[in-house]
Image: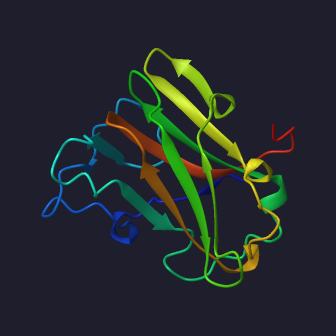
Amino acid sequence: FPVILGNEKKYWWGVNENYSSNFKFTTSTNFANSNISFALSVNYDLQKIDKKWNSFGFPFNKWELADLSEIYSTSALSFKIISEKVPKMKIIFISYLGKPRNISKIISEENIFKIDEKTFEIIIPIKSVKNYDLINWSNMKELRFKILESSIFEAVDFNLVEFKGNPN
């Protein structure tokens, strides 16, 4: 730990300025202690014509399966949001095999930790996700993020971190 996620732009999906300006990569992040050299800049408006472009994601392991079966029970997804407030967002974990093939969680107040005036760390313990024990963690595929409200923010530093506390 930490397991760094989303650190190669070429594996991300949903970020294509030829079709939508909702998501774009930026190298100038407001969070100087970032583990990677870029951030995702989000400017999503439910009223715009390209409102259907509200999701982005990346694989756990370059579109090859990732075996997280040994660490998922003591892990949490962690990332940072730079904004006035944390947007309403759904996180989806997707597996290549098994039923269910995905599980999801909407970020809630207990997942948000304020670092400074405009920086928030989001920590989602895997055990806090409904049906976490039913998905096939030995064949994980990707993480998806669905924006559920109009918002402007940067997202950076996606990691799996060790988490042994109470998931609630």
Does 20 sit left or right of 114 as displayed? left
Report whether 32 appears left or right of 157.
Answer: left
- Towards the viewer: 115 or 106: 106
Q: Is residue 54 visible?
A: yes
**Residue 116 x/y as whole percent:** 51, 17
Coloration mode: rainbow
- Quadrant of the frame with the C terminus: top right
State the residue in front, 149 or 13.
149
User: Relative to 140, is 33 on the left or the right?
Assistant: left
Residue shown at the point (63%, 50%) measured from the top left: 105
Of residue 142 and residue 150, the one placed in the foreground of this image is 150
How many numbered tags mark residues here? 0
Give the image quarter of residue 71. bottom right
| Residue 140 in picture, x, y percent from top left | 64, 75
Horizontal relation, residue 115 to residue 8: left or right: right
Rendered view: 47 above or below 13: above
- Residue 33 visible here: no
Where residue 143 appears, as percent x and y from the top left, is 54, 63
Displayed quadrant of residue 53 = bottom left
Q: x, y percentage for residue 90? A: 53, 49
- Give the vertical position of 115 relative to 134 (above or below): above
Give the residue at x 49% y 76%: 62
> Furthest residue to the front?
47
Q: Residue furthest top?
A: 117
Which residue is at a point 38% across and 66% down the rendered structure image? 12
Residue under the image location 37 percent in, 48 percent down: 37
